[in-house]
Image: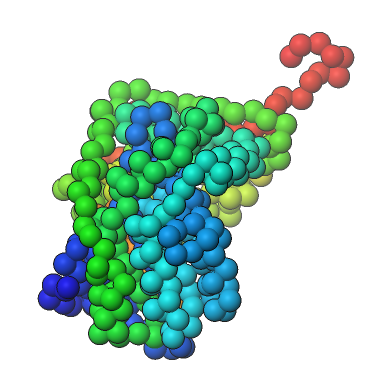
């Protein structure tokens, strides 16, 4: 039932990788510090793969995967894991849907069997689907509708991704969520949930031989199925600067953020830019030693917080972002101007050899720390493979970061940090009403 084992490069993680005959990819991350294992099953489907009019259906199905199968009643999965002294949960992103458990090593076969069961034997009807629809609508109300920052974040995504489905929220738009049916959930399940569209990652006190045997026993008999290509619309060239503002009485701490469309690690021909953007983010952010904190918070004392970040792990597009929160609410415009000035200085004067060297070293240290624990490495591997990034590329990350030069950083910055490529968002409380009650 197995193809030959192919040892993966050990640059970032000690890992072994193989594929079952039915197409299930398997990665083993041995770590013999405690008799514990962490298992993940990641499906190569996320919110960005939803059919038109059913945005958020991937997240809805994630909830429903804890309902009944041919072998287990609804809710039994988590109850069994709890009785075994373990923990379990799941999450959905734009690119993947993931299910994970942590248990004592002797129970790995049990949780693997349960995951294999619900991969093909989920049973749904209106009696379980419709109440769960109310649950996710309530979840949206609590996490999005009642949060000004989250609402503004949705608006930023919609403005940044004008054509690509990353512009739609993972949880879904409320008016579409209200239309979800049992047939919608089952159609999505049968279309995407198959062993040849999944990755199994096991980290902890195991060997590749043990996982190979268990995976062959529990997942090996599952039939592969035809799975659609992940066809997503591309973004057109950006032509206009975009600016959004949200004013709400619920806002206590105003701020300005800026999101810029960027290449991802996986994007064709963009890997060098992605690694350079990681170094740039470390130079600009870098905790207490980054440019923005040092200059805006410490030296100018115009902000209580300022920073930058690069997210390049998505399948299709990445994002480079900035944020600043003023010392005083009335200083918001000045804080934004100070942020603009720092971006201008970066593009005009560049970065130094010393800055790049120190940023690369901090990222190297972070990559060493990333190997600690079980969940962290498993999630990095599972999310990368689920987004179609080869394991070898993930393993080579430290080496490629070490090769980034100041010229690489500036080339990437010039390509990404243009006004028309970014969306600026302002979050503030409403202006105070005049004392005399007249209109401002």
Q: Would you say residue 94 is visible in this rendering?
A: no
Q: Position of residue 1 (x, y in %)?
A: 17, 73
Q: Viewer-proximal residue, 380 or 59? A: 59
Residue drawn where x is 36% and y is 52% of the image: 96
Q: Would you say residue 316 is visible in this rendering?
A: yes
Q: Position of residue 372 (x, y in %)?
A: 43, 77
Q: Viewer-proximal residue, 438 or 66? A: 66
Q: Viewer-proximal residue, 257 or 72? A: 72
Q: Viewer-proximal residue, 309 or 335? A: 309
On-image quarter of the C terminus = top right
Residue drawn where x is 25% and y is 75% of the image: 216
Count of marks, rendered view? 0
The picture quadrant where one finds residue 381 is: bottom left
Residue extending furthest top?
438
* 385 relative to 329 in the view: left or right: left
Q: Please, which colouring scheme is shown?
A: rainbow
Q: Position of residue 352 (x, y in %)?
A: 31, 57
The picture quadrant where one finds residue 251 is: top right
Residue drawn where x is 54% and y is 58% of the image: 74
Q: Position of residue 119 (x, y in %)?
A: 36, 59
Residue extending furthest front?
70
* 386 relative to 136 in the view: left or right: left
Residue drawn where x is 23% and y is 60% of the image: 223
Where 114 sits versus 191, above or below?
below
Where 78 sits versus 253, above or below?
below
């Amino acid at each position: 039932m197995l193809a030959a084992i192919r040892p993966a490069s050990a640059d970032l993680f000690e890992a072994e990788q193989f594929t079952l005959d039915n197409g299930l990819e398997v990665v083993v991350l041995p770590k013999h510090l405690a008799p514990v294992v962490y298992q993940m099953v990641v499906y190569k489907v996320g919110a960005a793969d939803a059919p038109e009019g059913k945005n958020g259906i991937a997240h809805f199905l994630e909830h429903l995967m804890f309902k009944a199968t041919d072998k287990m009643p609804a809710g039994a999965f988590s109850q069994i894991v709890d009785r075994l002294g373990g923990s379990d949960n799941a999450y959905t992103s734009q690119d993947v849907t993931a299910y994970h458990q942590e248990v004592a090593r002797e129970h790995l076969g049990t949780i693997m069997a349960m995951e294999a069961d619900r991969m093909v034997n989920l049973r749904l009807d209106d009696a379980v689907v419709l109440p769960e629809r109310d649950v996710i609508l309530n979840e949206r109300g609590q996490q999005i509708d009642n949060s000004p920052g989250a609402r503004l974040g949705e608006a930023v995504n919609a403005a940044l991704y004008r054509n690509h489905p990353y512009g739609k929220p993972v949880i879904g738009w409320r008016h579409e969520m209200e239309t979800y049916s049992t047939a919608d959930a089952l159609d999505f399940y049968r279309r995407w949930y198959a062993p040849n569209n999944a990755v199994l990652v096991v980290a902890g006190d195991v060997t590749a031989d043990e996982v190979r045997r268990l995976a062959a026993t529990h997942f090996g008999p599952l039939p592969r199925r035809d799975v659609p290509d992940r066809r997503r619309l591309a973004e057109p060239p950006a032509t206009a600067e975009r600016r959004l503002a949200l004013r709400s009485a619920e806002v206590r701490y105003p701020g300005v953020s800026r999101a810029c469309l960027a290449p991802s690690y996986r994007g064709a021909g963009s890997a060098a830019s992605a690694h350079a953007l990681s170094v740039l983010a470390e130079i600009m952010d870098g905790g207490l030693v980054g440019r923005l904190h040092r200059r805006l918070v410490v030296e100018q004392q115009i902000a209580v917080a300022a920073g930058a970040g690069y997210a390049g792990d998505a399948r299709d597009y990445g994002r480079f972002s900035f944020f600043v929160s003023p010392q005083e609410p009335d200083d918001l415009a000045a804080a934004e101007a100070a942020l603009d000035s720092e971006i201008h200085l970066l593009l005009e004067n560049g970065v130094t050899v010393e800055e790049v060297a120190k940023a690369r070293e901090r990222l190297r240290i972070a990559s060493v720390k990333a190997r600690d624990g079980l969940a962290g490495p498993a999630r990095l591997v599972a999310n990368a493979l689920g987004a179609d990034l080869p394991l070898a590329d993930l393993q080579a990350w430290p080496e490629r970061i070490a090769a980034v030069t100041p010229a690489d950083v500036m080339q990437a910055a010039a390509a990404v940090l243009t006004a028309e490529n970014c969306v600026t968002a302002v979050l503030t409380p409403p202006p105070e009403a005049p004392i005399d009650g007249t209109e401002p």
